[in-house]
Amino acid sequence: MIEVSVPGDKSIGHRCLLLAALARGESRLSGLPPSLDVASTISCLRSLGVSLEDEGAGEVKVTGPTAWRTPAEPLDCGNSGTTARLLTGLLAGLGVEAELRGDASLSARPMDRVVYPLQAMGARMAYVEQPDHLPLRIERRASGALRALRYRPRVSSAQVRGALLLAAVSGRTDLVIEDRHRPRDHSERILRYMGAPVLTESVGVGERVSFRSSGWDGALSPLAARVPGDISSAAFLLVASLLRGSSLTVRSVGLNPSRIAFLRVLEGAGARVDVAESGEEAGEPVGDVSVYPPSGLSPFSVEGDTVPGLIDEIPALAVLASRVDGVSHIRGAAELRVKESDRLALIASNLSALDVRCDESDDGLRIEGSTEPIVGSVRTEGDHRIAMAFAALGAAPGCSIVVDDPDCVDVSFPGFWETLGRVTSGGVER
Ligand code: S3P
């Protein structure tokens, strides 16, 4: 059995850093991923006056409370949607003036989903160039506190939830969010762990999250946490291993139930999946995941309520589908069109260029897989998950894939190519 580990979870890392800056006292975080996205959050926080010492090897000391200041230059969120959206919420709650910018990919992604509800809470912000897109200027509030909000988002998104919770907690304002589906719940877990009164209730297949400021003294306890390995990064290695027909264990990854829905899909395709939980970090379950390949993989369907729980794993599942004899479907995943690239279009065009039959619809893909060798090159448009998904496909026997921008994996998984090399030998060129 091959055993590997992966860098720390990006979603948890961003939130630990942002929330540690709000805590009173010294937080110690370890296991932060050396990824470009988390580096964007760190550099934005420093520009805002956060006392953050990098102690090396993924360890950071954050000392709060922060004396927030307006940065001299626009804050650069790089490629990171989580940095841009969560910081928008935090700055809106604090009433700190700042301009947020991003790279070309991030500047093409929608911001209204956080801007509208934050404006409804009384925050003041304006787009600098074009509606719905970065750059965005967050303005000082003329007077008064934020208003309470009860909100039913059009899209169930953890970034929207995280942004609104950060605004409500830092602005000491009541908030109720009613989501139709359940996005990842890291913000809620970490806030509760730090002592904030955040309540989560199931409502059918959806969820209601509430924060009530009255009766709370506003103190968030400092964090001492080791960020678990990123299960979304592990997904590419688990799929690569199944495609090769070999077993793999990924050690010490986050096992938050809102992140592991793709493991059920792997089981549906015939794989054996073992999950061994070993503990908790900052309210997040952690443990090892092992996969064992079946003698033949079966086609599968991904749709509806399960999509928010595996949204980042769809590129990996799509390449798995391309090697399964039969037709697999992905539906209800229109959100993939506004990720780091239009992932539905890019997966479809790359699979088609590799002679895999793939039909794209508004919100999904129909993939007709086979076990014929797949050889060729793919376009990533700088999207880390597209690069890693097709690299995993290149690991299948008889397949060889050239990825046009191998370095883009650094957004979430520096060291990916070396780790993939340990999971497989050959078949992948960079
Ligand atoms: C993230 C939430 C998801 C996910 C993204 C990270 C987060 O986006 O796709 O990679 O850390 O909150 P949405 O909230 O837009 O679904």
Image (tube, rainbow, N blue to C red):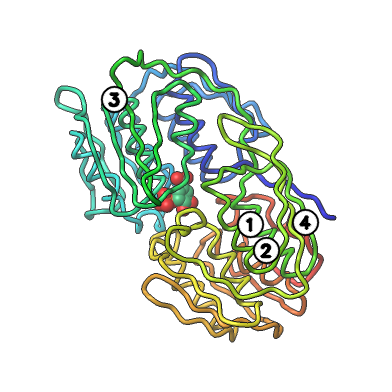
Lower sequence index among marks 3 and 2? 3
Q: Percent from the top left, x then y, of residue 372?
A: 70, 85
Q: CA distance from mark 1 to mark 3?
A: 37 Å
Kindly identify the amino acid type of the residue bearing the numbered disc 4.
Answer: Leu
Rendered position, 76 above or below 317: above
Lower sequence index among marks 4 and 1? 1
Kindly identify the amino acid type of the residue bearing the numbered disc 1.
Answer: Ala
Q: Percent from the top left, x then y, of residue 67?
A: 38, 18
Q: CA distance from mark 3 to mark 2?
A: 43 Å
Q: Residue at x 35, y 16 (%)?
A: 216
Lower sequence index among marks 1 and 3? 3
Q: Are marks 1 and 2 in contact (CB under 8 Å)?
A: yes
Lower sequence index among marks 2 and 4? 2
Q: Percent from the top left, x then y, of residue 270?
A: 69, 68
Q: Residue at x 55, y 76 (%)?
A: 328
Label 1 CB-ligand 1 distance < 8 A: no
Query: Which residue is outermost to the right?
Result: 1
Residue 171: mark: 3
For the C terminus, the image quarter is: bottom right
Rendered position, 44 above or below 197: below
SS assignment at label 2: helix
Q: Which residue is mark 4?
A: 248
Tell me the mark number nearer the camera, choosing from 3 and 4: 4
Kindly identify the amino acid type of the residue bearing the numbered disc 3.
Answer: Gly
Q: CA distance from mark 1 to mark 2?
A: 6 Å
Q: Which residue is mark 2?
A: 239
